[in-house]
Amino acid sequence: MEFKQVLGNRRSIRYFEPDRPVEKEKIQVMLEAANRASRSGNIDYWKALVVYRDELSPELIDQMRVPTTTADLDLAPVYIFWFADMSYADPANFQKNLKELVSVGALNPSHGWSDAYVDDVVIGTVIKPLLSDTQTVAWMGTLETGLAICQAMLAGVDEGLGVCLHAYNAEPVKAAFGLPDHWVPCWVLLVGYPAEHPQTGGQRPRRSISTSAYLNNLNTPWPEDPTTTERLKREGLIQDPVDIPGRMEEVRGLAQRFGLPE
Amino acid sequence: MTPEDVAAAATVRRWLASVALQDASAQDRDRRLALLADFCRHTGQSPDELVHGCLRTTKAGDTAISAKRRTAMNATIDEFVAERGLDGRDAVVTGNTLRSFLVHNGIFIQGRAWRG
């Protein structure tokens, strides 16, 4: 699928084919996409625990349920638990990885980088102070993990899967799998083949980019170029909004199929 | 409490107006009302009391869902379904029909899905 079509096609899928197996190859594609995400200092911030629903005990699934994530856990065949690994916050990790980036020419003298700069200056005057602030450590760890999750989601869409991020009760999962305390739970990504139409009747409402983006100063909303907007429609990034009557009929049918509240 | 009594409750009128039952048969509507009436008898509460029992008022005066009472409500629904001797799809659908009444009255509550 073309990249912009993938971006335009992504939806939060809430009805999955509960018993259609998800190929491990496709999960690997998602994980590799996560691994390719932008990451400051080339640090491994994210951890993922992939679990096939039917490998979990019903008791553990029950313990994971929160009011917003109940039926979804029954329907999705695969759960990917994402964590920000806070053990990243060690200056030695940054020293090693930054020097690796210097050695492969990613960080280069053109921009002021050298092994000496990393060893003699950056670690002591930038990294150590940064990592001594717990709020910054938490912000950076979860932000960078979010970038990885986003790429995994888009890769899943490209593979024909449905994905949706959810809250869950993390403590039973941590206990059941012996996960370390420095793995901070982010979300669980539910994965499976959509039981609903993958485009769910159309794109969900979004405000214009000019309500969030500005040009040069905050008095100038981003001036949208209609020609570009039209191109993005042709390329699938901008799609028709939801056909509400059709969507409501689909939702009713799905509720009846799965015995869920109408 | 009869289905007619139940149908007169404000929360039930809200449910029927909100849930997509425009195309449903009178028989289907009556079946849902009869089920809710049975549940009201089981709990000894009116439909309005079922809804308001899941809510609480915060110190700031806002309406919030009581997590404890919602958990208790889910358990009561499961117990009611079990006492009727239902299992499989019938059990799931019956419980979720009652949850539909709560959902359309602002109670965020989820039951299980039927996977066949």
Image: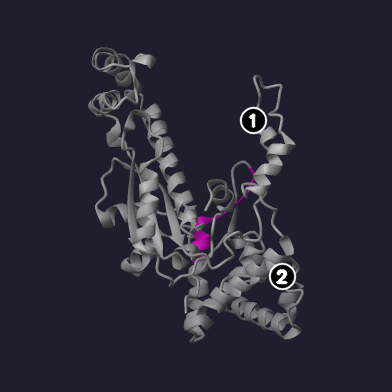
Residue B72 vs residue B86, the one in the foreground: B86
- Residue drawn at x 48%, y 65% is A193
A140 relative position to A4: left or right: left
B107 up-or-down from A109: above or below: below
Query: Within the image, what quadrant is residue B40 found in?
Result: bottom right
User: Is disc 2 surrounded by few (<14), some (14 to 19) or many (20+) residues within 10 Å?
Assistant: few
Q: Position of residue A186 (x, y in %)?
A: 41, 45
Amino acid type shown at disc 1: Ala
Q: Which mark is residue A64?
A: none
Residue A101 vs residue A216, the one in the foreground: A101
* Mark 2 and mark 1: Cα distance apart in space: 38 Å
Kindly tell me whether residue A185 is visible in this rendering: no
Q: Which residue is mark 1?
A: A213
In the image, the segment drawn in magenta is B61-72
Q: Which mark is residue B20?
A: 2
Residue B64 vs residue B45, the one in the foreground: B64
Query: Within the image, what quadrant is residue A249 found in?
Result: bottom right
Q: Position of residue A144 (x, y in %)?
A: 40, 36
Q: Is residue A213 magenta?
A: no
Secondary structure at numbered mark 1 = loop
Q: Position of residue A244 (x, y in %)?
A: 72, 61
Label 2 resides on the chain identified as: B
B10 relative position to B65: left or right: right
